[in-house]
Amino acid sequence: MTSNEMLSTYESLSALTGTMLTAARQGEWDELAMLEQRCRGYVGSLMDAAPVPLSATEQRAKVAIIRTILQHDAQIRALTEPHMHMLQQRLGAIRTSQRSVEAYGAQRA
């Protein structure tokens, strides 16, 4: 991977996390999950790439892009954590209900 390819990948990742943030703001959870899979692909390609020497200008650009990605990530987490908490509560209530039905059914048999 060249330095230009690496920076382009970071820029694509930044744009993708911006789209993910929009999906989270709109409560488009299925879309967000799909975008997260694409995001993993970009991250995987960056992790698999050999280290690339960067000029000072390229290094500053990379740092700025990463900061944007991290800001998007923090905002996405702030939006998704309440939703995840609500889902966990609902799943817990469903499990409790299922256990009650199973216990009641076992007593009737």
Image: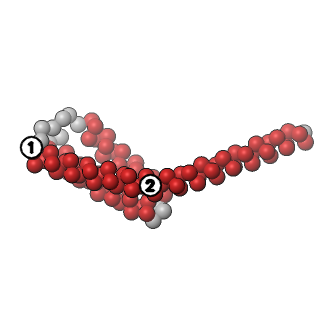
Q: Which mark is residue 55?
A: 1
Query: What mark, if any, has residue 78 been given in the picture?
Result: 2
10 Å neighbourhood of mark 1: few (<14), some, or many (≥20)?
A: few
- Residue 15 in the figure: left or right of residue 55: right
Which residue lies at the image location 43% right of the left edge and 63% below the top edge?
Answer: 25
Question: Can you give x and y, in whole percent of width and height, for residue 101 in the image?
Answer: 80, 46
Q: CA distance from mark 2 to mark 1?
A: 35 Å
Locate residue 103, reporting x and y percent.
82, 40
Assign a secondary structure to mark 1: loop
Residue 81 vs residue 24, the one in the foreground: 81
Q: Is residue 1 left or right of residue 21?
A: left
Residue at the spot x=23%, y=37% of the render?
Answer: 49
Residue type at numbered disc 1: Ser
Q: Earlier in the sequence, mark 2 or mark 1?
A: 1
Which residue is at 28% across, 37% downward? 47
Q: Is residue 19 visible?
A: yes
- The amino acid marked with disc number 2 is Ala
Residue extending furthest right? 108
Residue drawn where x is 79% and y is 45% of the image? 100
